[in-house]
Amino acid sequence: MKFYSLEPEVAGSLGHDTVMDTSVHPPRVHKLSYELEGWLGDDILESFPCYIITEPLKKRLETSSPSGCGFDNVDIVKSQQFDMLYPSRELPKFYWLRIHGKAGMDDLGISDDNMLIVSERILRVMSQFHLDNCDIEEYQALFKIAA
Amino acid sequence: MKKAASEFSKSTDYKKTFFEAYPELQGKIIVHHAVEQQVLIRYPGIISEEEIHSLENLRGIPNELNSDLHLGRIRKEWNRFYKTNPKPTKEKLLEKATEIDLKYGKLFKPPKG
């Protein structure tokens, strides 16, 4: 099966209420707050090491039972700048897409260089949503052959 | 290569700091931090709040460029930096800000880099 490396839109940053352990890399996030500073409209957003998705995408993914991920709550905070840029913009509900899969094996995984790797099957699902600002490349895993 | 300088500012009201220096740009630009504010959360203790909000760390991005430039390209550049730099020094953060100034700074108001 083919896999793809995704670099989603970065619409903001980790909010002040995020609780995480920065003594490890990638940081271990226990509670996620995502501060939107602008939003170009994609259904999957990133702020390393976290990904959030809109409710419609979450519902669609759930019907595909992807391996390597789970869903959790996220607090969405609009920055002053966001309110200034989009004074009347309604936001959908977002969910935290928690990824624990192995890149190139599970439907969703994180590579050694901290990129989001998804299977072709899941990319097909995601492609039905807005991914206009998400960079997508085919993922080439480097396997070490034991001597 | 000239590095993005970081000086102390007593004020954390960064927009006031910027528009006091460049009043003619009021309403025409979005004030953006060269070294992003979130480094205070990601890398606690490396850079102070005063340094983050100092005039030297502030950039004016024309309103008409904001979606494309600020939200799209610059934020992605920083996100890539966070992925590959678990424990950067202040110097390394300033180098990244300078790299971005060199790429996009001609479009800023006032221009940088």
Image (cartoon, rainbow, N blue to C red):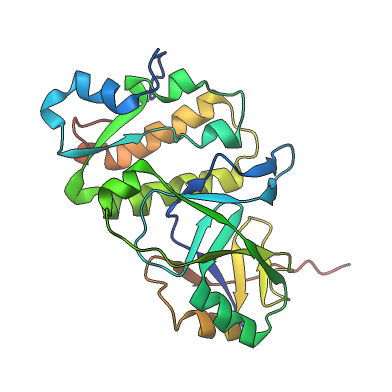
The residue at 69%/57% (across/down) is A112
Give A146 or A128, whichever is nearer the viewer: A128
Where residue A90 sits, quadrant-wise, is bottom left
Q: Residue at the far right: name it.
A: A147
| Above-or-below relation of B50 to A125 | above
Q: Nearer the viewer, residue A30 or A118?
A: A30
Say whether residue A50 is visible: yes
Coordinates of residue A98 in the picture (x, y in percent): 67, 63
The reply to whether residue B70 is visible in this rendering is no
Residue shown at the point (52%, 57%) measured from the top left: A46
Residue A18 in the image: x percent, y percent?
61, 44
Quadrant of the image for the C terminus of chain B? top left
In the rendered structure, the answer to whether residue A58 lies left or right of residue A25 reads left
Instruction: Pick whichever, A118 or A80, lies toward us.
Output: A80
In screen coordinates, is B44 left or right of B100? right
> Where is residue A57 drawn, in percent x and y?
52, 77
- The residue drawn where x is 59% and y is 60% is A115
In terms of image quadrants, where is residue B85?
top right
Query: Which sits in the foreground, A40 or A35?
Result: A35
Residue occupying the far left of the picture = B24
Name the quadrant of the N terminus of chain B.
top left
Q: Is residue A68 above or below residue A79?
A: below
